[in-house]
Amino acid sequence: MSDTQDPGSLSLQIVTPHKAVLETDVSIVTLPGSDGVFGVMPGHSPFITTLRPGVLEFEEGGMPRRMAVSAGIVEVTQDRVIVLSRTCESRDDIDVERATRAKERLETELAGKTHADESWDRLEIKLNRAIARLDVCSL
């Protein structure tokens, strides 16, 4: 915990291969884990897990914020959450028309395939990323 961190908060760090996206203190963070959505508050038991494409939500200074993330890794300690993600986009970073077109195209592609098709997983990941982008922009 940093000297200036509120004891009732967590340090949230989000890093992509291209840049450090965010470093801030939050009261809660909710993440799209590979095994399902999970929340973290100060004092949480430490663990490491994988991240799937989805919406990362957190409360900063009493204000809710949302970001679209892709696959990655999350490390949780009692006072810190570190997110290492391939991408992380805020509402201002997202082109809604492009995300809508991608979602429609991917739904059409998936409709013609089965789970046994070797491209299914890749297309589903891309579709979930497009859906997360649209979810972040929907409010």
Image (tube, helix red, strand yellow):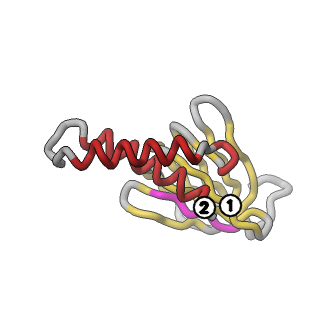
Identify the residue at the far top of this view. Answer: 18
Answer left or right for 137 relative to 129. right
Would you say residue 50 is visible in this rendering?
no
User: At label 2, which amino acid type do we have?
Assistant: Glu
Residue lying at 68% horizontally and 41% vertically, measured from the top left: 21
Residue lying at 53% horizontally and 47% vertically, measured from the top left: 69
Residue 90, position as x, y percentages in the image: 65, 48
Task: Find out whether residue 31 is within the magenta segment.
Answer: yes
Residue lying at 65% horizontally and 62% vertically, measured from the top left: 58
For the C terminus, the quadrant is: bottom right
- Compared with 50, 60 (above or below) is below
Viewer-nearest residue: 81 or 22: 22
Viewer-nearest residue: 103 or 56: 103
Q: Secondary structure at mark 1?
A: strand
Q: Is the C-beta separation of discs 1 and 2 under 8 Å?
A: yes
Rounded to the nearest whole Å, what is the CA distance between mark 1 and mark 2? 6 Å
Mark 1: few/some/many CA within 10 Å (<14, 14-19, 20+): some
For the N terminus, the quadrant is: bottom right
Residue lying at 40% horizontally and 63% vertically, measured from the top left: 36
Q: Which residues are magenta?
A: 27-32
Residue 61, position as x, y percentages in the image: 79, 65
Q: Label 2: which residue?
A: 57
Q: Label 1: which residue?
A: 65
Residue 77, position as x, y percentages in the image: 59, 57
